[in-house]
Image (spheres, rainbow, N blue to C red):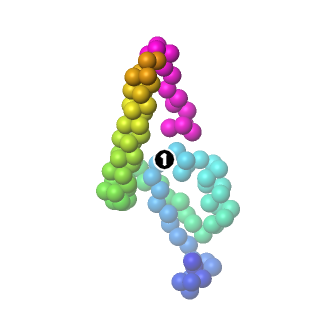
Amino acid sequence: QKTQLHYGNDQECVVLLDCWSVHHSKDFCEIVRTHWPWLHLQYVSGSMTGLVQPCDVGIQCPFKLLIKCSQLNDIIAEILAYLKGGADATQLLVNTRIGTL
């Protein structure tokens, strides 16, 4: 992209990131330093995200809320189907592993 925009190899870029734990992880920072050394990571405090990342609040937050509501509705429907099928409620186990959710 830098070549297409006719920027020199010494052109640097500041990337604003929220305080999500993955953004602070050693692995993430090392990958960025290794593959994109011209990027400088700057972190926005949690209370300032909406100010410097308006799409995070105005677009992504409502979108994420819709996804969470949809997931909850799926879980409720699955449990109700299980119970309506005559299964014993005391034997109900909801898989809450990250990969499942």
At x 57%, y 66%, the residue is: 39
Residue at image location 53% in from the left, 70% down from the top:
13
Farthest residue in the right direction? Answer: 34
- Residue 59 percent across, percent down from the top left: 34, 57
Amino acid marked by disc 1: Trp
Task: Tell me if residue 93 comes above or below residue 17 in the rendering.
Answer: above
- Please say whether residue 48 is visible from this viewpoint: no
27 left or right, relative to 69: right
**The one of 51 and 61 positioned closer to us in this rendering:** 61
Q: Residue beneath label 1, please? A: 20
Q: Please count the marks in the image.
A: 1
Q: Give the range drawn in magenta.
A: 88-101
Magenta stretch encompasses residue 45: no
Q: Image point 55% across, 47% down: which residue? A: 22
Q: Check the image and report above or below for 7 versus 72.
A: below
Secondary element at tag 1:
loop
In the rendered view, would you say 14 is above or below 93?
below
Q: Residues within 10 Å of mark 1 (few under 14, many from 20)?
A: few
Residue 10 visible? The answer is yes
On the image, the x and y values in percent for residue 52 come to 36, 60
Indicate the quadrant where residue 76 lies. top left
Which residue, as the protein is rendered here, is positioned at the far bottom?
6
The picture places residue 14, in percent across and down from the top left corner, at 50, 66
The residue at the far front in this view is 85
Task: Answer above or below: position of 7 versus 34.
Answer: below
**Left or right: residue 62 compared with residue 5:** left
Give the position of the N terminus as an image quadrant: bottom right
